[in-house]
Image (spheres, rainbow, N blue to C red):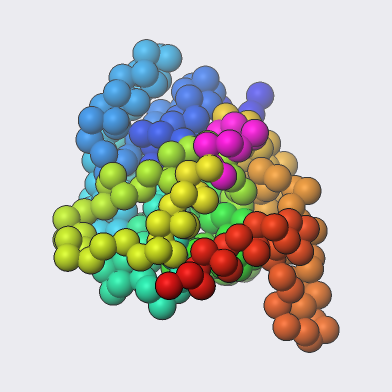
Amino acid sequence: MHPLSGGVAVITGAASGFGLEASRTAARLGMRIVMADVQADALEAAAAEIRGLGATVLLYQLDVSKAAEVEAMGQATLQAFGAPHFVFNNAGVGAGGLIWEHTLKDWEWVIGVNLMGVAHGVRVFTPMMLAAAKADPSWRGHIVNTASMAGLLNAPNMGVYNVTKHAVVSLSETLYQDLSLVTDQVHAHVLCPYFVPTGIHRSERNRPEAFADAQTRPTKSQLIAQAMSDKAVTSGKVSAAEVVQFVFDAMAQQRFYIYSHPTSLGHVQTRLEDIMTPRNPSDPFAARPEIGAQLRESLRQS
């Protein structure tokens, strides 16, 4: 039996991708589930499916970048189900382009969702999980933060996304160390997927009007980044369901780092060797020089 069976799950970004697959798995484990997402219609449809699996679901529409909304969801969770045994800080958005071409609103939107959304989830749910652990020596909890392989590497033309995902890895590693100081009952994990078909390449569909740049047309680098993301994400061979199985396996085994494509860790090793040697950052296109040449040619054309 999985240690989370019959427990409580809080899942952000629950209407699609990893969040929806995690909701399905949680339902099969008999968990009570808080499903949260910014997209109301997709969330309603997803919650109907999960209820159809027999799960008790608290549906919660919110923007994870807004502290007050995450705090309200925390209180609703506590009142409805008690402290969660599994918190999946998973909501995220993608944005590409040359790093100096991101607008202020680009930075505010992506940092708000990818980084502050995780920070709010950690800030709101960790204390209630620690309180539950203190009250019951047999209680166990897990916090999983979705980062990316972009949190361990720095691919070009993905600036603001790289920045936020590196921050999520740092936040998660710090959370792991901080929790180890105060408890053996609550554990942290970080998910670092590579290209998996999840819908993140269509993030703009959920971009709030407050962060829209109506007068700013996408730059050449941003259009190229979007096209590359569309191709890479949709052609991914590892499914979201497989990645979520990795997540639940890691929680059962108390493994911190969770990878969808462990064979890609060779690129991480190269980066760490760059840092330790020290030497200048290695060419990310060394194994596929034709892609690097095409990208440089496209960006240098007037």
Q: Residue furthest front?
A: 302
**Height in image: 99 above or below 224?**
below
Asked if residue 233 is among those painted magenta in the image, a careful observer would answer yes
Picture residue at 78% right of the left edge, 48% below the top: 263
Judge by depth and name the residue closer to the eye, 222 or 233.
222
In the image: residue 125, left or right of residue 292: left
Of all residues shown, which one is farthest toward the bottom? Answer: 278
Residue 62 rendering spot, x and y as whole percentages = 25, 46
Number of numbered callouts drawn: 0
Q: Is residue 270 left or right of residue 7?
A: right
Quadrant where the C terminus is found in the figure: bottom left
Q: Is residue 140 visible from the viewing direction of this image? A: no
- Can you tell which quarter of the image residue 83 is in? top left
Q: Is residue 203 left or right of residue 267?
A: left
The image shows residue 155 at horizontal and vertical percentages of 60, 65
Which residues fall within the magenta stretch? 232-240
Q: Nearer the viewer, residue 233 or 178?
A: 233
Residue name at image x 23 percent, y 66 percent: 216
Residue found 17% across the figure and 61% down from its top: 214
Q: Name which quarter of the figure residue 232 lies in.
A: top right
Q: Position of residue 108 (x, y in %)?
A: 30, 68
Report the quarter where the N terminus lies.
Answer: top right
Which of 260/297 is in front?
A: 297
The answer to whether one can see residue 241 in this image is: yes
Question: Is 273 a magenta residue?
Answer: no
Q: Position of residue 99 (x, y in %)?
A: 45, 73
Q: Residue at x 74, y 52 (%)?
A: 264
